[in-house]
Amino acid sequence: MNRLPQGSILIVDDEIEILDALRDFFAEIGYETERCTSGGVALKVLEKRSFDLLITDLMMPDMSGIEVLRAAFSIDPQLIGIIITGKGSVQTAVDAMKSGAFDYLLKPLEWKLLKPVIDRAIEVGRVRRSEKKYRAIVEDQTELICRFLPDGTLTFVNEVYCRYFDKKPEELLGKSFMPLVVEEDRSVVFGRIHSLTPENPAISYEHRVRAPNRGIRWQCWTDRALFNDDGIIIQIQSVGRDITDRKLIEQALQESENRYRTIFENTGTATVIIEEDTTISLANTEYEKLSGYTREETEGKRSWAENVLAEDLEMMRQYHRLRRIDPAAAPSRYEFRFIDRSGTVKNILLAVDIIPGTRQSIASLLDITDLKTAEKNLRRAYEQVRALAAQLNEVEEKERKELVRELHDQVGQNLTALGINLNIILTEIAGKENDIILPRLEDSLMLLEQTTERIRSLMSDLRPSLMDDYGLMAVIRWFGRQFATRTGISVTVQGEELDPRFDQNVETTLFRIVQEALNNVVKHAGAQNVTITLAEKNRQIALTVTDDGRGFDTQRVYLSPEQPKWGIISMRERAEAIGGDLRVETDPGKGTRVIVEVKR
């Protein structure tokens, strides 16, 4: 077995548990460690002693891992740095690598993969510290090498440099390389070169060049200045490589990020990105307005749970867990109550889903507080209207009953008395010759009989006496016969009288619905047959009126302002006034069925 490499590692993380776990792991594989809970403390330690490797967490309170790396490299340029994090993105990875990180690892760490990464990093650090080996490795890996004077005049170019620009050495040596650089970048290159000092003799930078047959390309150069005894630059040695592919990737990532940010900002609703641990990692301007918290106060610092009313919290936490097990296991749209910074409770319609390929979710929050208030007020007004309608129906029935009683007790009795008187007069003058009075008397008796019959019919229409004496089924059968005689439409009544009888108001309302339904049949259905069924099951009354008419398209009728709907509306209002439910089942050419259901 090969002996594990030895070395010293400085670990920076604000979580003691992570520090302890890493210390134990590195001790087990033979490395010496020192732990720091903040970047500031780590930098002070680094000023006092050197380490082979620096491992730092990305997100820390005092300074980020990238800031720690940059400061550490200014103290020890040969130091190897690795960033670990549980909250990274592609852009974060790019920033980390640009800052000089050797590698970028995601939590939770896979220990079996961590060891080879550490071994390789330690070895690279040792090679860097060996100047001879470091230079050999750099020259072997670099594509373009040149030396030039402070004014840019080339004094040496390697073969790769010549091949890249498609020129011979004699076409380059003794001439400035500046014409190869894109004009807009030349001042930047000059500025970088002349920023070199004996204290800071090396610098890396990027710029664009014009390459024959390949157009504009990106290069990254590392310059090291050579100084005379007076500190004057006498020559610069430079190593470069083509980074066009990387820049294109970065550009594409940036464009994608910009597009995403634009969409994210302009959704029109408060939108957030939520991590698996419930932390809000990204929030837009609308969320700032909704919550009262700024992005700086929210992103990476607040959990969505902090803004949820206690009564809704457990339900939402359960959804959060289920969504990460199976996105289909939790609802993607639901309502909850949100508490803003001032303590105001708002009703929110939440739309949330998992971002594919991640453990993150994206959520949009729509404030429906005003809508809920309007719904509540509308519901209250609707209940008041329903109560008023029920009261009006009750008053109407009472007035009908009073009118029938008045017609029966007063008008009916008077007509009867009048008939008796006319018959007495007719008897007295019978057999006597009176060609003028006798015909008029007989005509008056006929008119009296017709008037009496019409009043009886009116009394039945206003309130059939069968309703009070024999119940709902009896009055429906009577009305069915009357309807069939008047219209020629066949009416079949099925069912038995309710036992025990229903409340009088309920029976009257059901009868009025039958009347309205049959009235609609005459007006609209073009039917030949109607069946009325009354049945009770499990203490629920079901009244059904079915016709074989032309039917209709419910969507077209209900949504069209031109289509009359008062009959259906009247029936539904009557049904709801007694706590029932009415529905209409129909299709063009398939007849219509009106169903009323009422619980006892």
Image (cartoon, rainbow, N blue to C red):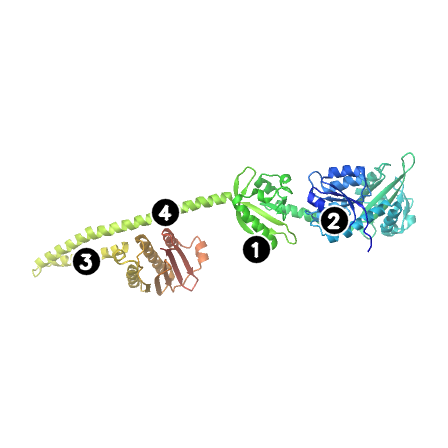
Q: Which residue is mark 3?
A: 449
Residue type (three-letter) at the residue carrying disc 2: Phe
Q: CA distance from mark 1 to mark 4?
A: 42 Å
Q: Nearer the viewer, mark 2 or mark 3?
A: 2
Categorize mark 4 by other alpha carbons within 10 Å: few (<14), some (14-19), many (20+): some
- Dot 2: few (<14), some (14–19), or many (≥20) neighbours within 10 Å? some
Please state which of the two labelled residues, at mark 1 or mark 4, is closer to the viewer: 1
Type of amino acid at the residue the image marks with label 4: Ala
Residue at 92 percent of width and 35 percent of height: 229
Q: CA distance from mark 3 to mark 4?
A: 42 Å
Checking the image for residue 387, the label placed there is 4
Report, in whole angstroms, how far the alpha carbon at label 1 lies from the one at label 3: 76 Å
> Around disc 3, counting alpha carbons within 10 Å, would you say few (fewer than 14), some (14 to 19), or many (20 or more)?
some
Q: Secondary structure at mark 2?
A: helix
Query: Which one is nearer the viewer's eye here, 435 or 239?
Result: 239
The span from disc 2 to disc 3 (Cα, nearest Å) is 114 Å
**Three-letter amino acid code at the position of disc 1:** Ala
**3 and 4 marks in contact (CB < 8 Å):** no
Quadrant assignment for the N terminus: bottom right
Residue 593, position as x, y percentages in the image: 39, 61
Q: Amino acid at mark 3?
A: Glu
Q: Secondary structure at mark 1?
A: helix
**First reached walking from the N terminus: tag 1 or tag 4:** 1
Query: What is the secondary structure assignment of the residue under circle 3?
Result: helix
Residue at mark 1: 329
The residue labelled by disc 2 is 25
Q: Is residue 313 visible?
A: yes
Total marks shown come to: 4
- Label 4 sits on a secondary structure element that is helix
